Amino acid sequence: MNVHQMSVGPLQVNCFIVSCNKTKEAMVIDPGEEGARILHMAEREGLKVSKVVNTHGHFDHIGANQQVVEETGAELMMHKDDLPILQNARSHAEVYGLSVSPSPDPDKLLEQGDSFRVGELNFKVFHVPGHSPGGICL
């Protein structure tokens, strides 16, 4: 497993690119902004982004969802309880005087105990509500 971390967007959110060393398949976690920068890092490392995972739906974690999904064909995933937050991200950002690119709806809504693969890596979903109703850890 390889993990690349970068801080993105005006709120400097932690974004991660997690990849399988053997297959070069990767997922992007919390692409808050700066989609071109995220994609450049993946390309530079020779990675194929197959999944985008939002740990929660707040605007500062989803701003580059659309660009990353459109340019890679990746599957977008997040917990089902944060779907309303994702769908209202624009109005939430405006409260702080910020803007955000709209996100497509997720391809897969996650729940506690779900699992998925990235290359030969296995990930399990842990539902950790608190900061938001649908917060998750992998």
Image: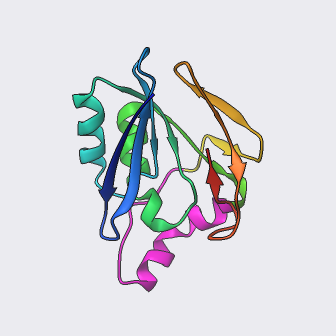
In the rendered structure, the answer to whether residue 92 lies left or right of residue 2 reads right
Query: Please, is residue 32 above or below residue 42 in the view?
Result: below
Which quadrant holds residue 56? Answer: bottom right
Residue 24 x %, y %: 39, 20
* Residue 103 shown left or right of residue 121 in the figure: left
Residue at 35%, 77% in the rendered image: 98
State the residue at coordinates (64%, 68%).
132
Residue 48 in sight here: yes
Quadrant containing the N terminus in the rendered view: top left
Tell me, yes or no, whether the highlighted magenta stretch contains residue 96: yes
Residue 116 position by quadrant? top right
Residue at the image position 55 percent from the left and 18 percent from the top? 120
Q: Is residue 120 left or right of residue 48?
A: right
Residue 91 magenta: yes
Q: Is residue 21 above or below residue 19?
A: above
Stretch of the chain drawn in magenta: 82-104
Residue nearest the viewer, comparing 104 with 93: 93
Compared to residue 109, the image places residue 61 above or below, namely below
Q: Is residue 32 visible?
A: no
Taking the view exactly as shown, the residue that stands out farthest to the top is: 22
